[in-house]
Amino acid sequence: MKDAEFQLAELGLLRPSPSGGRVAISPESAADALLAPMEQDILQRRIAMAATRARLHALSGDYLEARSMRSAKSSIEIVEGIDNIRAVIDDLGRTCAKSLDALVYGGPQTDDALRAALAVDRELLSRGIRIRSIFQHSARGHRATTVYAATLASEGGQVRSTAVLPSRMLIYDDCAVLPLDPLNTAGGAALVRDPAVLKFLKQLFEHYWDRALDFAEEQRTGPEPAGVEREVLLLMAAGKKDEAIAHQLGMSPRSVSRIVARLMERLGAESRFQAGARAALNGWLS
């Protein structure tokens, strides 16, 4: 009995009576007394949140002005530090209105990078942004990259691959992001807004896009080389340089270079050694 009285008293349902003993209190009155301090605390927190939100919103004009001044001062801006690069790319993604074109240099990407990219790409696609990405053929054998490409394509993105890419590159509407060092993308990035340079970079992307294969399409090596192409392939696989091949076949080095480039593209190879290995697997060297 004492325990029950103690619990009721804790809930405010029993209070001491002036005449002695205890008197029962209605649940509504007890609730008002118990919850009043909590409601006051919640109210104060809401007021503090509203004040913080108002202060942040008040800075929006300054941010937009600073951003426009940054763009106006220089058509090519250098950003250093991985955190700063990520912040800039995040900003470009949020303000992107039309398209994102990407050259994904370097073969297979890390699983974490692909997961992060897919989350961002989905958000862009949900806003109607067109996304086109070009990987290198060597990424086709990487399961996580294959899953990423298939998922992106199923949700409206476009993914292709090609043998060789010159560098990593992102083009958000009218701003291109290029690494200062293609082998160390965390070292720094250049933001390019100059119309002439940007036009060239967009043409460069279209050049690779037009020649790339759909990522879901099987690579086709085409017919077995014959004639001069076969002779060049055999000498290339033997380790001969273009000049030596040209001298041996009585051709110009430039003609040999063009044939070698065509063979490497057909084989989806990134190096002469890889081209020789794939040609051997196809039975072209026998």
Image (cartoon, rainbow, N blue to C red):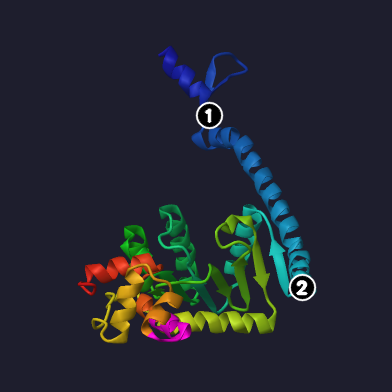
Q: Nearer the viewer, residue 93 or 134?
A: 134
Determine whether, in the image, residue 211 is placed left or right of residue 184: left
Tell me if residue 283 comes above or below residue 224 in the rendering. above
Secondary structure beneath disc 2? loop
Q: Which residue is mark 1?
A: 25
Residue 264: image location, x then y, percent: 37, 75
Amino acid type, residue under disc 1 in the picture? Ile
Which residues are drawn in magenta?
250-259
Judge depth for marks 1 and 2 and give the one in front.
2
Q: Nearer the viewer, residue 89 or 35?
A: 89
Amino acid type, residue under disc 2 in the picture? Ser
Q: Which residue is mark 2?
A: 74
Q: Is residue 257 highlighted in magenta? A: yes
Determine whether, in the image, residue 26 is placed left or right of residue 221: right
**Measured Cα–Cα span from mark 1 to mark 2:** 73 Å
The reply to whether the C-beta atoms of the residues labelled 1 and 2 are less than 8 Å apart is no
